[in-house]
Amino acid sequence: MPQRVPDTRPRRWRQIGRSEAQAKRRLADEYDAAQERGEVATQSRGGANIADGVPDGNTVATVTDLGLTRKQVHEARQLRDAEAVDPGVILRWSEV
């Protein structure tokens, strides 16, 4: 009996479709661009370093304020970066 080869694809990418992959890549790009523009918190600017009682509430939006989780942004970045290294990899993995 032939030995079964283990599936090494990340589990969350096995059932992802083209539309969802595009949406996640766009999420990563837009989130990073918003951080660069100063509209979304980073670790060094407003993220974990937000002091309680900031005057006038002049803080930037956090990932939670946007209705996302850090895990969602992290996974979107991973998917985007994987596609940058090997275009079409997510689609190929989802078709196997």
Image: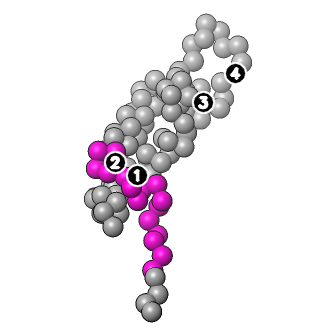
Residue at x 45% of width, y 71% of height: 7
Label 4, on which residue?
51
| Element under disc 3 | loop
Give neighbour class at mark 1: few <14, some 14-19, many 20+ (Cα, 10 Å).
some
**Residue 17, position in %: x, y?**
32, 51
**Amino acid type, callout 2:** Ala
* Residue 2 in view in this figure: yes
Label 2, on which residue?
21
Asked whether 71 or 3 is in front, the reply is 3
Q: Earlier in the sequence, mark 3 or mark 1?
A: 3
Q: Marks 2 and 1: in contact by CB < 8 Å? A: yes
Q: Earlier in the sequence, mark 2 or mark 3?
A: 2
Q: Which residues are magenta?
A: 5-22
Residue projecting furthest to the right = 52
**Amino acid type, callout 1:** Leu
Quadrant housing residue 47 = top right
Q: Earlier in the sequence, mark 4 or mark 2?
A: 2
| Element under disc 4 | loop
The CA span between labels 4 and 2 is 36 Å
Give neighbour class at mark 2: few <14, some 14-19, many 20+ (Cα, 10 Å).
some
Tell us which disc is closer to us: 1 or 2: 2
| Element under disc 1 | helix
Q: Indicate yes or no whether the magenta region holds residue 54.
A: no
